[in-house]
Amino acid sequence: MIEISRIETKLGKKIEKNNVIEKQFSLKRNSIEKLVGIKKRYISNKNETSEKNAIEVCKKIPRSVLKSISHIISVTNTPSIKFPGVSNFISSALKIENAHCINLNLGCTGYVDALSIAYDIISAKKKSNILIVTSDTYSKFINPKNRSIRPLFSDGASASIVKYSKKGFRNTLRKFKNIANTEKDLCFSKNEIFMDGPAVLSFAIKYVLPEIKKYQNFSSSIYLHQAGNIVHNQIKKNIDKKVFLPKNFHKYGNLVSSSIPYLIKDNFTKFKNSKNLILCGFGVGLSLSLLILKK
């Protein structure tokens, strides 16, 4: 059984409000928020890379905690170099030299995937203490003239400590799905991010929503990747009103791999006191990853 004992977060230092984009593209005032539900985005400056943001968020964790880390699992789609991975930079910067470094090239499913791996590691060895770090800087790879996806994505990082606890969560179900021939619907090619918005939305409605509906009775809370207004509202309309479905995309935008840890942190007391819950990430692939956790 596992517990997430703490989560630290970091956002890009620059704030881009909707009115900047609306003015640039001659859009109606407040039209972006009405469509996607996002009020503003946090953008990394020139010096804030995925690696640097990951290191900075880890520095918020006390040294006494970092000393006991046995594994570092990093998640990013936007490294500044192809290799080595983010976890290796964290190991060097924070002098965690005896940790097993695991680097995942994943997007919006990444935190759920990392937590699934952490669960297996802890199940095999209870003394393991795992640092899961998510960090993405999508803004650096979005064409400023792309008015479809520029209003969606924020840059951010998170660091979670995951360890064994007798009173923690058991993973009672895992569900993974990857849709064939959808790789180009959300991809990073020729140093730029491309997204087919209607295709991604169709994927969420056709594949993610049925899975949430199918398993909602196993949970009192659902922590869902924060893609935006349309997906959230569709899922909210189709599940029991008693199920807690938090949201924070209106505050932060789409934080990619950091989306779910930010959501958990914003509702940390309720999360830790839950008896059963669902975590579901979906996006790049196109794919989804779903975990049911129960105490």
Image: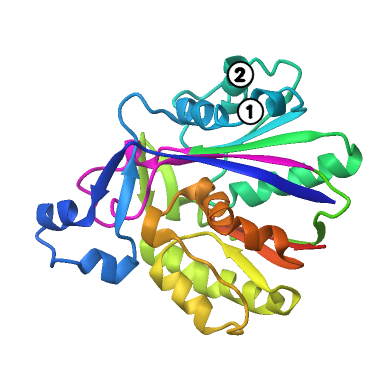
Q: Residue 280 versus residue 157: which sits nearer the camera?
A: 157
Question: Any mark on residue 98, and which?
Answer: none
Check disc 2 and give the amino acid type: Leu
Does 150 lie within the magenta span? Answer: yes
- Describe residue 102's horizontal placement relative to residue 254 as left or right: right
Residue 57 percent across, percent down from the top left: 52, 32
Residue at mark 1: 62
Residue at mark 2: 94
Q: Give the residue displayed 52% in from the left and 46% down from the top.
A: 258
Residue 119 percent across, percent down from the top left: 79, 46
Q: Residue 256 versus residue 250: which sits nearer the camera?
A: 250
Quarter location, residue 216: bottom right
Report the magenta residues as a range: 136-163
Quarter location, residue 32: bottom left
Q: What distance separates the C-alpha of mark 1 from that of mark 2? A: 11 Å
Q: Give the residue displayed 55% in from the left and 31% down from the top.
A: 60
